[in-house]
Image (cartoon, helix red, strand yellow):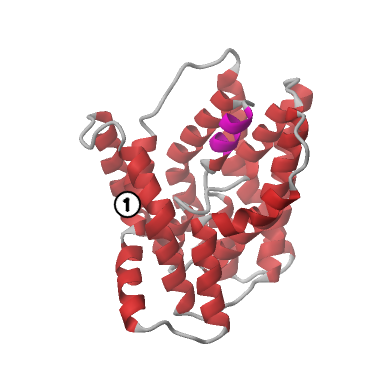
Amino acid sequence: MLAAFVPIWVLTGLGWLAGRYRLLGGDAERVLAGFVFRLAMPAALFTTLSRGRLVFHPGALGAFAAGTALTMALGFVLCAVLLRRGLGAATIGAMAAGYVNSANLGIPVALHVLGNATFLTEVLLFQVLVVTPIILVALDRAAGRPLRPATLAGMPLRNPVIAGLALGALCSALHWRPPELVAAPLALLGAAAVPTALVALGLSLTSGGPRQPGERAEVAALSGLKLLVQPVLAGLAGWAVGLGRADLLALVVCAALPTAQNTWTYAAEYGQGESVARRTVLVSTALSMATLACAGWLLS
């Protein structure tokens, strides 16, 4: 199992070196991340799902949801009660503690380590359809903005990753395979998703910025919740419902993914907890290579 992480480490390290020495220019992270998010990752999801059988794992998904809810609640209490943050900053803290990077890093890990992205697509849908609306409602309330149900309802349709996932799932459900003239180019494009995403991830690790007072302890606590507490809680919930070893491995690996970059995106949009969000993404991403490998080794 540990050998499956070696290519992930190598490509992420290559991206870090490219960013450290500016080998690809100053806009490389933005360009590569945009390519992965808008083109390669949707194609990879569509290809994977359209060629397989659509399966749902209610026990595993329920255990993941339980671990996510408990971890985000702990993150919110940490920020709101112990650190006296406002509603907006505490919401961002909760998101940093429990919202996994299911796309940019999750899909490469799932495809390379687990062999498929079946369970990860369920995680992705749960986060987009259930968790994200709750977070945005809380941020809107903190910012004094009115609720925007139309915006929330249309969010999955405007997200290229979700669009690729939905179309692939539809083809699988209908047992319809697209013609080779369509499927072959999409498969070729999707094959670029994993290596490009990992290089872009390495590039993101070279980003920085000024640190706010008291931020180090907050980032450490939120990263600990994300990388240690969430997978443990999810694993215990999965064990309690009697999941098999393969399903338990997929559950814990997905729960051990680092904080999603969307956390910083939302923090910047609402002007709440931006520095903490950015550094939690960077720290949890950098450390996740080790925690993911440990999770895979323990459950393999």
Q: Residue at position x 65%, y 71% from top?
A: 57
Percent x, y for residue 2?
A: 38, 56
* Crowding near the residue tagged with mark 1, few <14, some 14–19, many ≥20 C-alpha atoms within 10 Å: many
SS label for mark 1:
helix
Q: Residue at position x 44%, y 44% from top?
A: 290
Q: Check disc 1 and give the amino acid type.
A: Thr
Percent x, y for residue 105?
A: 45, 51
Percent x, y for residue 113?
A: 42, 62
Asked where in the image residue 242 lies, by quadrant, the reply is bottom right
Using residue 72 as the reference point, say whether residue 215 is left or right of it.
Answer: left
Give the quadrant of the N terminus: bottom left
Q: Residue at position x 38%, y 53% from top?
A: 36
Secondary structure mostly seen in the magenta stretch: helix
Determine if residue 235 is in view: no
Using residue 75 as the reference point, say whether residue 160 is left or right of it.
Answer: left
Using residue 139 as the reference point, say whether residue 2 is left or right of it.
Answer: left
Q: Name the residue under label 1.
A: 196
In magenta, the rendered stretch is 263-270
Percent x, y for residue 276?
A: 57, 26
Q: Relative to 178, say whether 195 is above or below.
A: above
Q: Relative to 83, say whether 144 is above or below.
A: below
Q: Relative to 232, say whether 113 is above or below.
A: below
Residue occupying the far bottom of the picture: 175
Q: Residue at position x 39%, y 58% from top?
A: 39
Q: Which of 295 and 267 is in front in this view?
A: 267
Q: For the image shown, how many numbered marks are present on the structure?
A: 1
Q: Is residue 227 one of those drawn in magenta?
A: no
